[in-house]
Image: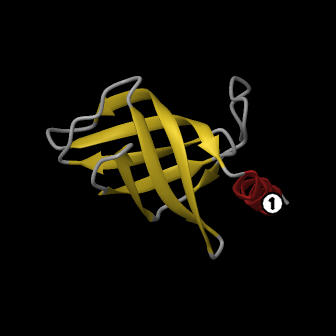
Amino acid sequence: MQDDRRKYSRIGTDQVISFAPVESRHQLGVSRNVSAGGIRFEAVGCEIDPDQVLRVTFNVYDQTVVAVGRVVWATEVDAITTDVGIEFIEIDPSALRLLDESMDAALA
């Protein structure tokens, strides 16, 4: 069921992604959901601050998507894990179409 406050529908995911501050080395995380507006993932062993800009790399179907987003929230789950939500600020239009198609398929 979709929360009425959400601007975009989300698809639950459980895939390894990579993320990094722009112009920095990548780290790994696990995505929890994705939408045309952003992605939620868990990061282990690093500090992530609100308003930080991150580059994320993840898959939609068999396509690799690279997007840049701003951290909207970051919540410590435990001593080493942070739950992170980012809003995309740069994403290829073809990647947005893929996300829209995957949303349609998931909701059908």
Residue name at image x 33 percent, y 30 percent: 75
Q: For mark 1, give the secondary structure.
A: helix
Residue 53 is left or right of residue 106, and the answer is left
* Residue where numbered disc 1 is placed: 101
- Residue at the image position 46 percent from the left and 51 percent from the top: 56
User: Which percent across, then down, holds residue 54?
Assistant: 42, 41
Compare residues 60 and 5 and report the one nearer the observer.
60
Q: How many marks?
A: 1
**Residue at (80% x, 63% y) in the render:** 105
Q: Is residue 21 left or right of residue 15?
A: left
Mark 1 closeness class: few <14, some 14–19, many ≥20 residues within 10 Å: some
Given the image, on which type of amino acid does mark 1 rest? Glu
Q: Is residue 28 above or below residue 81?
A: below
Nearest the viewer among 64 and 7 is: 64
Residue 3 falls in image quadrant: top right
- Image height of 15 relative to 44, above or below: below
Q: Position of residue 58 (x, y in %)?
A: 51, 61
Quadrant (top left/top right/bottom left/bottom right) for the C terminus: bottom right
Q: Is residue 30 left or right of residue 37?
A: left
Q: Position of residue 43 (x, y in %)?
A: 30, 48
Residue 55 to residue 73: above or below = below
